[in-house]
């Protein structure tokens, strides 16, 4: 009986996950359809671009700079020990462009923006503001989700470019001044090993990251129930779901782009 109950609980959870995924796909399709049909509020989209992009810039740059510095500190000491210090620049460039820059930016934005979007839309939901929008003839998807979806998909690559530059610069400073690696060799090796596709592939990944962050955060907000407690639970669930989704998608996109 105990094993039967356990199997039933697992089956119910799997069924719930599949159902949630189906609803997310349907919501994503509605958003993309509205975008292709031109149902985009430019003013709201620009406002969200400022909130998602510009206001997240200091956090993204500080995180990327210190992650690049730590990465350089770890690999440069080992490379120098084996007489391969000249390759640190190339490894840093490839690592930051392909993975560290996109992944760190996605994680930082997911932690900050997903929580904010879910809390905002969730509060509107529990206070019946979304029902008021429907009563006034406004489409909540077009008014609330489409601007955030576009803003996240556009601003994530821009933030990633700046994060890559900052992370590489942090690595350059540590490798040059702490590990005493020749800065000329560092830059020359980075130029010889780093390809344009390493950068473009990483930026393409962040477009998907932005769409995932926005759609999951908005979906969790629309599902919020139960007042202030429900908003808190939805916010936590949104951040956790977004981060897990980013890690999974990042793995498959890395296989697709860089294998």
Image (tube, rainbow, N blue to C red):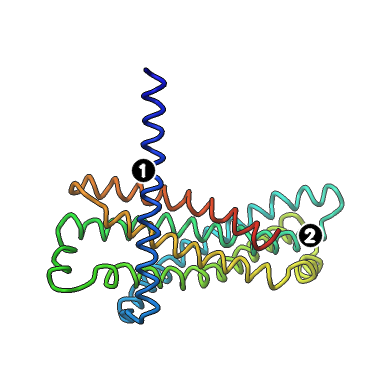
Q: Position of residue 118 (x, y in %)?
A: 31, 57
Q: Which residue corresponds to mark 1? A: 16
Residues packed near mark 2 inside 10 Å, few (<14), some (14 to 19) or many (20 plus):
many
Q: Quadrant of residue 23?
A: bottom left
Q: Residue at x 58, y 61 (%)?
A: 65
Residue 95, position as x, y percentages in the image: 67, 59
Q: Count every numbered label the image shows and give the total.
A: 2
Q: Residues within 10 Å of mark 1 (few under 14, many from 20)?
A: few
Query: Which type of secondary structure does the marked residue at label 1 adopt?
Result: helix
Q: Quadrant of the N terminus?
A: top left
Q: Is residue 150 left or right of residue 130?
A: right
Which residue is farthest top?
1
Write the residue at 63% across / 52% down. 70
CB under 8 Å between discs 1 and 2: no
Q: Residue at x 13, y 66 (%)?
A: 132
Q: Which residue is mark 2?
A: 181
Q: Position of residue 163 (x, y in %)?
A: 56, 66
Q: Secondary structure at mark 2?
A: loop
């Amino acid at each position: 009986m105990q094993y039967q109950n356990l199997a039933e609980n697992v089956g119910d959870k799997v069924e719930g996950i599949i159902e949630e995924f189906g609803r997310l796909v349907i919501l994503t399709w509605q958003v993309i359809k509205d975008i292709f049909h031109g149902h985009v509020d430019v003013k709201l989209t620009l406002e969200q671009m400022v909130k998602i992009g510009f206001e997240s810039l200091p956090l993204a740059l500080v995180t990327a700079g210190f992650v690049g510095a730590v990465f350089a500190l770890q690999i440069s000491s080992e490379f120098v020990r084996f007489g391969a210090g000249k390759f640190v620049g190339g490894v840093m460039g490839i690592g930051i462009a392909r993975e560290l820059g996109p992944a760190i930016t996605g994680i930082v934005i997911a932690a900050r923006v997903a929580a904010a979007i879910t809390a905002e839309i969730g509060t509107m939901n529990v206070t019946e503001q979304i029902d008021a929008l429907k009563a006034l003839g406004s489409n909540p998807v077009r008014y609330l989700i489409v601007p955030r979806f576009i803003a996240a998909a556009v601003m994530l690559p821009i933030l990633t470019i700046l994060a890559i530059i900052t992370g590489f610069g942090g690595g350059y400073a540590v490798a040059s001044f702490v590990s005493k690696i020749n800065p000329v060799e560092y830059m020359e090796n980075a130029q010889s090993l780093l390809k344009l596709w390493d950068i473009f592939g990483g930026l393409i990944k962040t477009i998907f990251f932005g769409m995932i962050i926005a759609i999951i955060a908005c979906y969790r907000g629309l599902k919020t129930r139960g007042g202030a407690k429900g908003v808190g639970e939805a916010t936590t669930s949104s951040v956790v779901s977004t981060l897990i989704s980013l890690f999974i998608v990042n793995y498959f996109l890395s296989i697709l782009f860089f294998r």
